[in-house]
Image (spheres, rainbow, N blue to C red):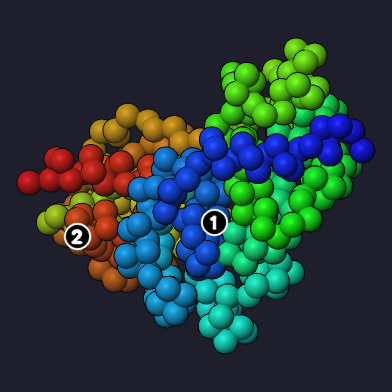
Amino acid sequence: MSTLETLFGSRLVAWQRLYGRHGLPWQVSDAYRVWLSEIMLQQTQVSTVLGYYPRFLARFPDLATLAAAPVDDVLALWSGLGYYTRARNLHKAAQMVMHDFGGEFPQQRQDIERLPGVGRSTAAAIAAFAFGRRETILDGNVKRVLTRCFGIEGYPGDKAVEAQLWQLAERLTPASRADMVPYTQGLMDLGATVCTRSKPACTACPMLDGCVAANSGRTAELPQRKPKKAVPERETVMLIALHQGCVLLQRRPPVGIWGGLLSLPEFDSTLAVDGWLAANAVGDLLPAWPEMVHVFTHFRLTITPQPVRLQQRLADSCHEDGWQWLPLADALDAGVPAPVRKLLLQALAITP
């Protein structure tokens, strides 16, 4: 074991107590609140979560309330936070805790890991923060810290490299349960505030004298990045059908992007919208609005907003599955994807 490995835990705990983040609303021992924060913080900045977290707790103050709520209510409060599978899994997990664990949040990492949407590192963080368990975390920030400090080569997403990082993280985890909360929080804080992806503040790092990346001038190289692939491009035409202050929406399938959310009906082309209008004889095509680009993790979606002028609402027989009319104000309060919300706000601005 290297000198830095020997000193890593004690240095980190001391640093966190002096310089780490304190007073965040989820820095409590309540398992429900810890779990909620960990799910919200997956692939989302703290500054963003700070706006959603109190609103979510005000509506769903405990597991029982969340489990009993309609999933649409959960999705509505999640709207704009992205990665909506998290919200659906959160709801399923709350129901699972009520059914399988008698309403008591499980304390063992292995049991927590059974919950939908909870992986090994997230389960470990919940067990450490809520119950003081000696568990090891390895999220993206932690991978960056360990890769730089100990000069781990290779892309951290590769299975062999990730296995090496898990072994290292296990060795570094302190034996004392009393240190688990400051140590785990310290790992997160160090990666988020000091050992950042770009322009790390190395002079403020408690590991500076032993850090391989800092001492070899390789902080920009480590961790090694995933080999780049061409980002696929997709296109869609979103129908904006308005009538007497209401908008036509469609429930998306439960799986796939924006699964289960209300969205605008989609077509392959403007010509397809025109053909649909002609077949139903309900209105006229208006000039398309400017294109909008929405970037997902694995592809870029170019949206063409296509408004239509309707003389009357569609007859029920013309509706596709899951199509429904909602007042614009109600649609904005429903669970809709972020780009759809922008289009609805634009529609609201021009609606008499």
Residue projecting furthest to the right: 1
Name the residue: 52% across, 64% down: 29
Q: What amino acid type should be assigned to the residue bearing mark 2? A: Pro
Image coordinates of residue 234 in percent, x first then y, are: 54, 37
> Which quadrant of the structure image shows residue 305?
top left
Q: Element under label 2? A: strand
Q: Is residue 1 left or right of residue 108?
A: right
317 or 327, nearer to the observer:
327
User: What residue is shown with label 1?
Assistant: 39
User: What residue is shown with label 2?
Assistant: 327
Q: Quadrant of the N terminus?
A: top right
> Which quadrant of the structure image shows residue 325?
bottom left
- Can residue 160 be seen? yes
- Tag on residue 69? none
Image coordinates of residue 142 in percent, x first then y, are: 69, 40
- Number of numbered discs: 2
283 or 73, nearer to the observer:
73
Q: Is residue 298 left or right of residue 329?
A: right
